[in-house]
Image (cartoon, rainbow, N blue to C red):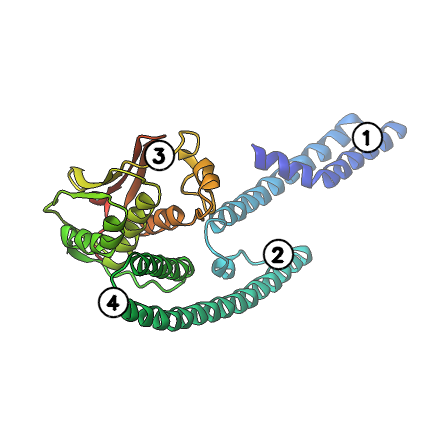
Amino acid sequence: MKLFISYLKYHKRLILLYVLFCIIFIAVFALYHLPLNAVIYPFVLCLLITAVIVIYDFIYIRQRYKKLEELKKFTEAMIEDFPQPHSVEEEQYAEIISVLKNEIAELEAVSGKKYNDVIEYYTLWVHQIKTPIASMRLTLQNEDSELSRRISADLFRIEQYVEMVLTYLRLDSDSSDYVFKEYDIDSMLRQCIKKFASEFIARHLSIDFTPTCEMIITDEKWLSFVIEQIISNALKYTRKGGIRIYMKAPKLLCIEDSGIGIAQGDLPRIFEKGYTGNIGRIEEHSSGIGLYLCKRICDNLGIKIEVQSEINKGTIVMLDLGRNRNVT
């Protein structure tokens, strides 16, 4: 009905013109005192012919409308399937769409090239900066003092931030390097925990890891990044106590800390890019990027991530590994 009303509005000038002609015919017949049947018969005949034409034209318009509605669901690559223009006006619209399509293609090509250049630059930068970091680590290996341990911890943080930059850039890459296989989650967790061993020792924090004895299908590199980021956040905001890692339910991995917690008002927004909340404003080194990256990666891996937290009572991050997507 909405389409038919719109159709009538679009052709209102023709309808008014038809009505005007009918009035003129009636007026002329009335002035010449001609029989009424002489005007009614052609009036009804013209009305029937017009109705047939309108119905036929409306059916054609409705078919085109339905096809255009279907095409709205596809990408700009489907523009070639547009209905053929049947008027000068439609041909102009088709030309405009074609011009816009070419401009979009050019902009995408330029944007894609710039994006690839940025990825290449930062990839090279990451490899270059890892060289002096490795050199500093070798230098510190022969020393065992509070200062050397503090510097080693800072170097580890730098490595994490470097990987975070590269991960952030790769998230929107057209080419994906996800490789899904079956992994032992316990082995993956032990490797992640081992990277933070010195920080646990230096800050006198405990780590309680309960083996899960679970096998999961995932991408080891990307999931390891998520786990490491969660552990890093837990350590960042934990002053005393420690961290527990356990399986609460079948393939529901929990990473729990005894840290300062997250305000209830901040919980709905913790996965937003750049959002730090009240705790982030107190802890100036918070970037608001870590959990955003975790959420994006978990979405790509088919993992559901949830957070439960209370101020001064700690935080629990839960990864539903049972929702992992299948190997492709």
Q: Earlier in the sequence, mark 1 or mark 4?
A: 1
Give how far apart the Cα atoms at labels 3 and 2 are: 65 Å
Q: Which mark is residue 118?
A: none
Callouts 1 and 4 close, C-beta under 8 Å: no
Q: Residue at x 38, y 34 (%)?
A: 262
Identity of the residue furthest to the front in this view: 145
The amino acid pointed to by label 3 is Gly
Q: Earlier in the sequence, mark 2 or mark 1?
A: 1
Q: Which marked residue is nearer to the observer: mark 4 or mark 3? A: 4
Quarter residue 167 falls in? bottom left
Q: Which residue is mark 2?
A: 86
Please state which of residues 44 and 242 is positioned toward the viewer in this rendering: 242
* Quarter in which the N terminus is drawn: top right
Secondary structure type for disc 4 = helix
Secondary structure type for disc 2 = loop
Q: Which marked residue is nearer to the observer: mark 2 or mark 1? A: 2
Q: Which residue is mark 1?
A: 26
* Quarter in which the C terminus is drawn: bottom left
Q: Which residue is mark 4?
A: 141
Q: Earlier in the sequence, mark 1 or mark 3?
A: 1
